[in-house]
Amino acid sequence: MDLFDPRIPIEKATTPPSSWYTDPASLVRERGTVFRRSWQAVGRIESVAAPGDFLSGDLAGEPYLVVRDGAGELRAFYNVCRHHATCVAQGSGNTEQLICPYHGWTYGLDGRLLKAPRMAGIQAFERDDYGLIPMQVAAWGPWVFIRQEAEGPELDQVLQPLQGRLATERLRFHKSVTYEIACNWKVFVDNYLDGGYHVSHMHRGLASQLDLSAYRTEILGQVSLQTCDAGEGGESKTGIDFNERLQGGALYAFVYPNFMINRYGPIMDTNWVLPLAQDRTLTVFDYFFDQDVDADFIEASLAASHQVQLEDIAICESVQRGLSSSAYDVGRYAPRVEGAEHHFHSLLAGEFQEAGS
């Protein structure tokens, strides 16, 4: 597998080879390294607030389950029955026990196997050895994070650069929107991390309301922060008043490898970027609004956001087609603006090299 050398300074570096984005073996490698080792924001803490509340999903091919047990402790497991591998839970809800729909194996909310029907005659079987396999779990702000591997930095350590930056106390969750995009997941991340380079070309409505000359990027461990001051304001073609929407500018926070937090005015939206295949990505947008904003503002803001997403999707899908061309292998960085993108690639390369892949 072609590698990217993070030791080369951005001024001289080339971007990762196109095989990172087009070769199915690259996604296999990432599932075994990047997604196993990283904290993943799988849901909102309000979804698992009460004993018995649970949520489940798929993380780059690994089914997961998060549940609040009877003692109020937050737990996470691989959502895989130890009998014949059926997913024990579906969707989200509230339950007293976790019962496999296939053969009725029953687990407590702490993951212990409580009942395994019709297993008479089995030998060398200890029920305590067949509980659900745990994952790491932690809460931060309004989110629940999980990690497959036990080793690595604590979540608080990873997110320390965001402490006190997001002001989420008055925000209320409004809705989730998902987009399926015909590109590699890293194409979407690269687009996010280009230091506003594409904004004046791809998002002219948004660009007219931002002072792009004041765009700044900070690299802080596994977090990169992009900030931009508001421009002169005005209305978008969706009718949103940008003076109200952008109030004081925007903060775009990226948490390696695939979580984005966008904070501006009375709004926060998050983007969780998940690979479905080497050339297919699911992006989950969660929208939060200040508790005092009215319905008309929310509707107009969602419409403005959707327009930006459609513009990003179009360019990301175009990039993916270009990456598959025999005419392209590597590109170059714009050193003054694409530092966060280079940092993202360097973190990926470091993980691949550490794993010997």
Image: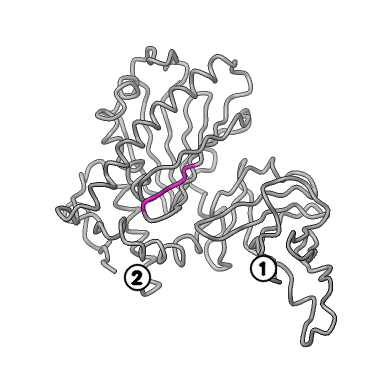
Callout 1 crowding tier (Cα within 10 Å): few <14, some 14–19, many ≥20: some
Residue topped by disc 2:
353
Tell me where the magenta segment starts and ends, as one range: 279-283
Whether residue 80 sits left or right of residue 22 in the image: it is right
In x, y percent, where is residue 243? 43, 15
Say if the magenta span includes residue 280: yes
- The quadrant holding residue 119 is bottom right
Q: Of residues 186 and 251, which is closer to you in this image?
A: 186
**Quarter of the C terminus within the rendering:** bottom left
- Give the alpha-carbon distance from disc 1 to disc 2, as whole Å: 28 Å
Labels 1, 2: front one: 1
In x, y percent, where is residue 118? 84, 74
The furthest residue to the bottom: 123
**Quarter of the N terminus within the rendering:** bottom left
Q: How is the image coloured?
A: one colour
**SS assignment at label 1:** loop
Q: Of residues 334 and 112, which is closer to you in this image?
A: 112
Say if the magenta span includes residue 73: no
Q: Of residues 92 and 150, which is closer to you in this image?
A: 92
Who's the residue at 25% across and 64% down the image?
5
Dominant secondary structure of the magenta stretch?
A: strand
Q: Is residue 166 above or below residue 349?
A: above
Residue topped by disc 1:
133
In x, y percent, where is residue 55? 67, 49
Which three-letter amino acid code belongs to the residue tagged 2? Gln
